[in-house]
Image (cartoon, rainbow, N blue to C red):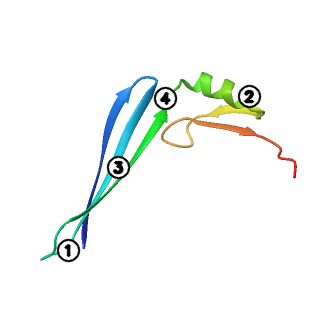
Amino acid sequence: MRFVLFQVWEPAPPLYETTFYVVGHQPGGEPLVHAERVTYYAVPLETLARLMEKAGFKSVRRIDEVYFQPVIAGRKLIAY
């Protein structure tokens, strides 16, 4: 079976929706299509860090140059 994968992005600031399509095709058969749609809340990294702190995360920081985009990390203790 062969697969084709693609995304369609629809911006509507501060949100954006994206649909991820997987099209599978087996020679001699009909193509099968699966689609997943999600909505993202696109905010600046500074806003995300403030939201994390407001939610109780500590030591919130931005980490650069370890991934192809910045990473925001924080710690939060959970009481059981």
Amino acid on which the number 4 mark rests in the picture: Ala
Mark 2 vs mark 4: which is more N-terminal? 4
Circle on res. 20:
3
Real-space Cα separation, disc 1 to disc 4, in angstroms:
37 Å
Image height check: is 33 above or below 6? below
Helix or strand or loop: what does disc 3 sit on?
Answer: strand
- Please give the label number shown on residue 53: 2
The quadrant the N terminus occupies is bottom left
Mark 1: which amino acid?
Gln
Disc number placed over residue 73 in the picture, else none: none
**Percent position of residue 72, x then y:** 63, 35
Count residues near mark 3 (Cα–Cα under 10 Å), then give few for <14, some for 14-19, many for 20+.
some
Where, by quadrant of the figure, is residue 18 drawn?
Answer: top left
Q: Is residue 45 above or below residue 40?
A: above
Q: Earlier in the sequence, mark 3 or mark 4?
A: 3
The crowd level at tag 2 (other Cα within 10 Å; few <14, some 14-19, many 20+) is some
Tally the marks: 4
Q: Position of residue 30 (x, y in %)?
A: 16, 70
Position of residue 74 in the picture relative to residue 4 (left or right)? right
User: In the shown orientation, is residue 19 left or right of residue 53?
Assistant: left
Q: Which mark is residue 26?
A: 1
Q: Are marks 1 and 2 in contact (CB under 8 Å)?
A: no
Sequence-first disc among 1 and 4: 1
Mark 1 and mark 2: Cα distance apart in space: 49 Å
* Tag 3: amino acid: Phe
The numbered dot on residue 42 is 4
